[in-house]
Amino acid sequence: MKSSNWSAVRAWRAMILVLLAIPLSGCVALAAAPLMMGASLATTGFFGYKLFQTASGSEVGVELPNERIEPQASQLVSGADTLAFWTSSDRSLVVAAEQVEQAMGFASVITPSNAARIIRDNDLPAEIDHLTTQERRAAFEQFAAISGADLVLAIRTLGVETDANTFSFSRAAITMRSRVHLYSRDTQSEIWVTEIDLIVGMGNDSPSEDELEDVLGRAIADRLNDIATGNTTQTGDAS
């Protein structure tokens, strides 16, 4: 279920790959998201959520700023039978669904492709970017009622920014920012909301677009497992 907005997402992600390969000067914001300086992975200590290694050997740091986890989230996630992943413009939620199917004990996982069919057949909004909180909750509630999902997880893109570390010896970095929403049918509310920042040092060993989507999906699945087990500390080992 592609749209013009999703084509735009692909366009700025392609721009990322160009930026990652060239040196920049100054700090350039490429989106209307709040400005946050990207941490450099060239320094010895990365203290974000986790540091992921891609298949090509690149390192991608993941941070979870402004994370909100409701007190009952652990019980609701660990006790859920069916988790649905909202339709997405890229492979990140496909990767997350695969990871969750392998690592967590859900009886059923509704993949983004199956979610797209349900959304299309029931005239639900495929994109959540321009929905109000109330509209988004109503869409999730209707989807959960139709599909039988206990939990619905959706993601939206916030933007990209670069930090060239002009006054530092650290390597320049680029930050891709997304926001995750996890809705519970039991509480009729979002029980986990967080920004997810992917931080990549710019240089010749920069990851591909597919690798970035893979890291985003793995990070979502890992955090879901953290919530289910009650282990929500934001510092973890590299994976």
Image (spheres, grey):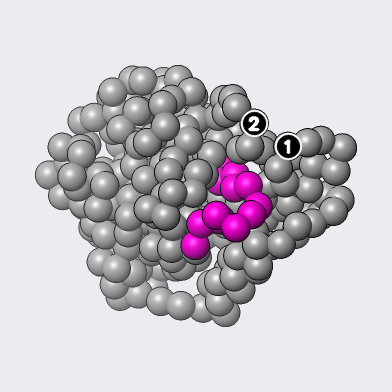
Q: In this view of the protein, can residue 16 be seen by the observer? A: no
Marked residue nearer the N-terminal end (1 or 2):
2
Cα distance, mark 1 to mark 2? 6 Å
Instruction: Decide if residue 233 is on the left or right side of residue 75.
Output: right
Instruction: Decide if residue 92 is on the left or right side of residue 110.
Output: right
User: Would you name the residue on which mark 1 appears?
Assistant: 170
Q: Position of residue 123 (x, y in %)?
A: 39, 73
- In the rendered image, the quadrant that contains the N terminus is bottom left
Q: Residue drawn 20% across and 39% down?
A: 103
Q: Residue drawn 53% across and 39% down?
A: 61
Q: Position of residue 210 (x, y in %)?
A: 43, 63
Q: Position of residue 10 (x, y in %)?
A: 55, 71
Residue 43, disc = 2
Residue 207 within the segment the image draws in magenta: yes
Residue range highlighted in magenta: 195-208
**Callout 1 touching callout 2 (CB < 8 Å):** yes
Circle count: 2
- SS for dot 1: loop
